[in-house]
Image (spheres, rainbow, N blue to C red):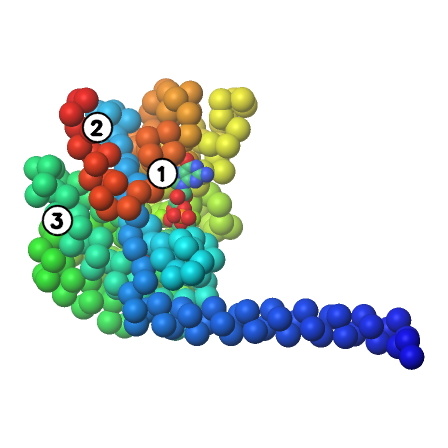
Amino acid sequence: HVPPVNDIRVMVYNSKLLTESNEKRDIELELHHAVIAEQFEVFYQPQLSLISGKHIGMEALIRWNHPTKGIISPLKFIQLAEELHLINQIGLWVLKKACTQTVEINELFGLDLRVSVNLSSVQLQHPRLLQDIKEILKETGLEPRLLDLEITEGSLFNFEKSSQILEDIKNLGIHISLDDFGAGYSSLSYLKKLSIHRLKIDRIFLLNIPKEEDTLMTSIVTLGHNLNLKVLAEGAETLEQVNFLKTIQCDEVQGYYFSKPLPYSEFTAYLDKYLNID
Ligand code: C2E
Ligand code: MG
Ligand code: MG
Ligand code: MG
């Protein structure tokens, strides 16, 4: 007996949905376990001054070291961690690890590198955030001026509340960067009212450089400078892009041209090599 075509479609569709929901449930369970088992690792990507040519700091970027699947990108689990209410715990773990390792790096090389840590919008709304940050700084001994917290435009939906928290963070002496700037849809009027130090221009703005004459990039740098902000360009992959950024007087840069994000030991090896060339 052959079932009518419609029934076959329903069966195929259902079994696909079932597989997807099983997969989702599996990864949810695994993420819960990953938090307990601390299956995470922080990678570091250097940030340089385009004026001095020197290293000014590094961005801390989380990776999930999955026991069978290998290294999993944050793009695949940060949103899920937010949905599962795991992001605060994960975010604080990253913050503590990044502060600890930055103190180590600075002692090792006799430097004053600043570490940039990404903050989810969920973390920004958490009532204990300020207290948690203070405790981590105290425990790890990192000077507040060497910590930079990266937030995105999406975090500002509750503007009054968010801007108050940012001001409190700034008053601790911590730096704040607006990440992925220009990639979202937000009004520019809020920029003047925010306690931030730096704009990080989203890497989409560098994609066509130097193939196209780019006025947007130049305008963003001017906008940032008019607001007394430093401007960092994300995603520089070529020397031409770096030179372009210098000519438009962008302050700082980060990208594969210098290095991909590296595990701690490789990052210190990278710094060691680079500082010996200087
Ligand atoms: P993001 O904060 O904008 O970080 C920059 C991303 O761009 C990183 O991807 C980095 O590897 C990548 N990148 C840097 N330079 C280049 C380049 O020259 N070319 C290209 N193609 N890519 C470049 P990654 O590490 O996969 O992180 C993706 C996103 O995941 C981050 O974007 C951030 O939004 C989020 N994320 C990473 N770590 C954390 C974390 O600890 N907490 C939270 N809440 N989010 C995190
Ligand atoms: Mg970032
Ligand atoms: Mg970014
Ligand atoms: Mg991003």
Q: Nearer the viewer, residue 6 or 113?
A: 6
CA separation in Å, label 1 and label 2: 14 Å
Residue at 37% over, 24% down: 242
Evaluate if marks 1 and 2 touch, with contact meaning CB atoms under 8 Å apart.
Answer: no
Q: Which residue is mark 1?
A: 260
Which element is circle 3 on?
helix
Q: Is residue 193 above or below residue 45?
A: below
**Amino acid of disc 3:** Val
Kindly identify which residue carries mark 3: 103
Which mark lies nearer to you, 3 or 1? 1
Residue drawn at point x = 34 percent, y = 54 percent: 62
Dot 2 surroundings within 10 Å: few (below 14), some, or many (20 or more)?
A: few
Residue situated furthest front in the rendering: 1
Left or right of 214? Residue 121 is left
Q: Is residue 62 visible?
A: yes
Q: Residues within 10 Å of mark 1 (few under 14, many from 20)?
A: some
Residue 263, percent from left and from top: 28, 46
Marks 2, 3: nearer the viewer: 2
Q: Neighbour class for label 3 at 10 Å: few (<14), some, many (≥20)?
A: many
Q: What's the mark number on residue 16? A: none
Indicate the position of residue 274 as horizontal and vertical percent values.
21, 28
Element under disc 1: loop
Give the numbered dot on residue 274: 2
- Label 3 CB less than 8 angstroms from ligand 1: no
Location of residue 58 by image quarter: top left
Quarter of the image with the C terminus in it: top left
Left or right of 179 on screen, residue 205:
right
Q: Is mark 1 within 8 Å of ligand 1?
A: yes
Residue at 77% across, 75% down = 11
